[in-house]
Amino acid sequence: MKRNTLLVAALAFGLSIFAQGPNDSGTYYKNADGKKGSALKTAMYNIISDHTDIGYDGLLEAYKETDTREDGYVRDWYSKSTKFVHIEDKAGSYKKEGDVYNREHLVPQSWFGSGKPKSDLHHVVPTDGYVNNRRGNYPLGEVGSATYTSNGGYCKLGSCKTTGYNGTVFEPGDDVKGDIARIYFYMATCYENLVANWNGGTASVVFAGNKYPALNEWALDMFMRWAEDDSVDEVEKARNIAAAGIQKNRNPFVDYPGLEQYIWGTKKDQAFSYDKYEGSETPEPEPEPEPEPEPDGITQPTTHSPLPAIYYNLNGQRVDGSYKGIVIVKGKKVKR
C-alpha cells in the first residue's frame, strides 16, 4: 500500500512539473482554470490583486529595470525623440518636448484618487513631461481632427473619431496601443473591487461604473482592436517579467495574448486553461526574413525600444552576472 501511495505521489509530482503556464509563470494562474467570462475576470483578480506597493518614489528606480532602451536611455511611451537619463532627467520644469520625463498614469490618477493604483508599475510608465501635460486626463481614443501632435506626429490630441464617443481624446503611438490596451484590461481586472467607483474627471467616459464589464462598450471595442492590431512582443513580455520581479504580480493579458476574448469577447463561453491555453484566433503575421547575423554571431533585436540584457531566475527575481543556471533575458530562457 505504501509503495502504491508513493507511486501515485510521484506521478502527481511529475504531472505538476509539466503543468506550467507561459513565460515561466509556472502555476501562478492555476486557480483560474475552467473559469469563463466574468467569473474568469474575478479569478484573475483574486490572483493578481495581492501585490507589493512599491510606492510612487519607487517607480523611478523600477524604471531602470522595466523601461530602459538598449542605448541606456529611458524608454519614453509618448515620444520618439527623447534621450532621458534615469533619475537625472526626471520631473522638473519643461517648456517643450524632450526637456524632462515624468511618471504617467495611463489610467489618470484624477479618475481613481489614491491607493495602490497610484504606484502600480504595470500602468504608471515614463513619458515626456510636456507631451504628458498635453494629454492631461483626457481619455485615450483615435483622433480625427488634431489640435496637437507630438514630434513626428507620434501622439495626437483632438476630436475622437471612434464610434461611440465624440469628445476630446489623446491617441498614443501605434506601436504601444496594444501594450496600453492590455494595461487597461489589467487595471479593470486587478482593481475589480474598486473600479466601480472610478468616477473622477472623465472616468465615466471609459469606465462603466461596475465590476463587469467595467469598461464602456466603445472603449472596450477599441481596446480589443488595439490589442489585436498590436500583438504582444518580446519587449512587452520582458517588461512584464521585470515588473513581476519587483511588484510580485503579473499582467495576465501579456502572458495570455487574446485573454480578453475569454473575458469580454468571442470566447467568453469557453473555459480558460492556464497550461493548455488556446489564444486568439487571429492568424499570426508572416515572419520577417531572418536578419544577417552580426560578426560576433549575435543577432540584433528588431523590436521597438528593446530592453537591456537584465537577468531573472525562474521565480522572477533579478540575479547578477555570476548566477549559474536557467535565466530569463528579454523574455527568453538562456542557460548560463
Image (cartoon, rainbow, N blue to C red):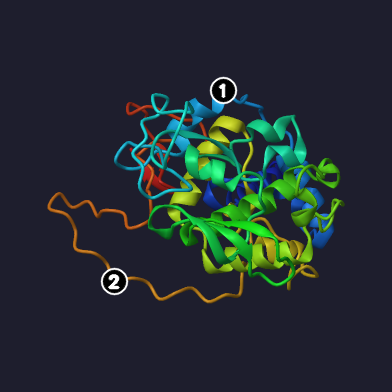
- Mark 2 surroundings within 10 Å by alpha-carbon count, few (fewer than 14), some (14 through 19), many (20 or more): few
Within 10 Å of disc 1 (Cα), the crowding (few <14, some 14-19, many 20+) is few
Identify the image quadrant of residue 220: bottom right
- For image coordinates 75% across by 61% down, the residue present is 263
- Looking at the rendered structure, which numbered label has been put on residue 57? 1
Mark identifier at residue 5: none
Whole-percent x, y for residue 47 in the image? 73, 42
Instruction: Give residue 178's position: percent from left, percent from top.
Output: 55, 59
142 w.r.t. 151: above or below: below
The answer to which of 44 and 111 lies nearer the viewer is 111
User: Where is mark 2, residue-wise?
Assistant: 289
The residue shown at (78%, 67%) is 268
What amino acid is found at the position of numbered circle 2 in the picture?
Answer: Pro
Q: Is there any visible trace of residue 122 in the rendered image?
A: no
Q: Amino acid at mark 1?
A: Asp
Q: Nearer the viewer, residue 282 or 131?
A: 131
